[in-house]
Amino acid sequence: MADDNEAATRVKVDVPAVPGLFRHNAPLGLPTGSVRALLALGLVGALVLLVALGIAPNGIETAAAGALGFYFGGRNGKSTGG
């Protein structure tokens, strides 16, 4: 009985290799930052569409401008002290 259990745990599964897929734990096999960029483009596109159609909630433009300013300010790399 022990041999049957041992044999069952040694099942080999052949998975076809796809070159470049899941390389270096990159999400979806894309270059670093690509998923973040696609999400940002989608959010900005949705915001532009809402503003253009005139159905944007009150203050959404101010909130988006603050978020973008915070993002690019953080990427600057300079410390403001404190």
Image: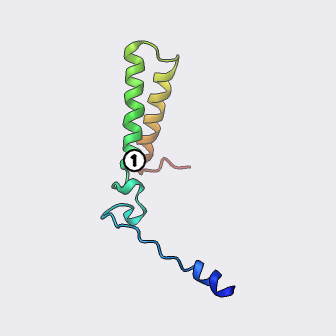
> What residue is rendered at 33% in x and 63% in y?
18
x and y percent of residue 3 in the render?
64, 87
Q: Considering the numbered disc 1 on the image, is that residue within a helix, a strand or a loop?
A: helix
x and y percent of residue 47 in the render?
42, 25
* 55 up-or-down from 70: above or below: above
x and y percent of residue 80 in the render?
48, 47
* 10 up-or-down from 59: above or below: below
User: Which of the pair 47/21 is nearer the observer?
Assistant: 21
Q: Would you identify the image quadrant in which residue 69 lies?
A: top left
Colour mode of the rendering = rainbow
Query: With 5 as the anchor, is 42 left or right in this view?
Result: left
Q: Which residue is mark 1?
A: 35
Q: Would you identify the image quadrant in which residue 44 lies?
A: top left
Count every numbered label the image shows and give the total. Answer: 1
User: Which of the pair 18/72 is nearer the observer?
Assistant: 18
Residue furthest top as drawn: 54
> What residue is rendered at 44% in x and 41% in y?
71
User: Which of the pair 70/53 is nearer the observer?
Assistant: 53
Locate the N terminus by quadrant.
bottom right
Amino acid residing under circle 1:
Val
Within 10 angstroms of label 1, few (less than 14), some, or many (20 or more) residues? some
User: Which of the pair 56/74 is nearer the observer?
Assistant: 56
> What residue is rendered at 40% in x and 59% in y?
26
> What residue is rendered at 44% in x and 29% in y?
65
Residue furthest bottom as drawn: 3
* 21 up-or-down from 33: above or below: below
Residue furthest right as drawn: 1
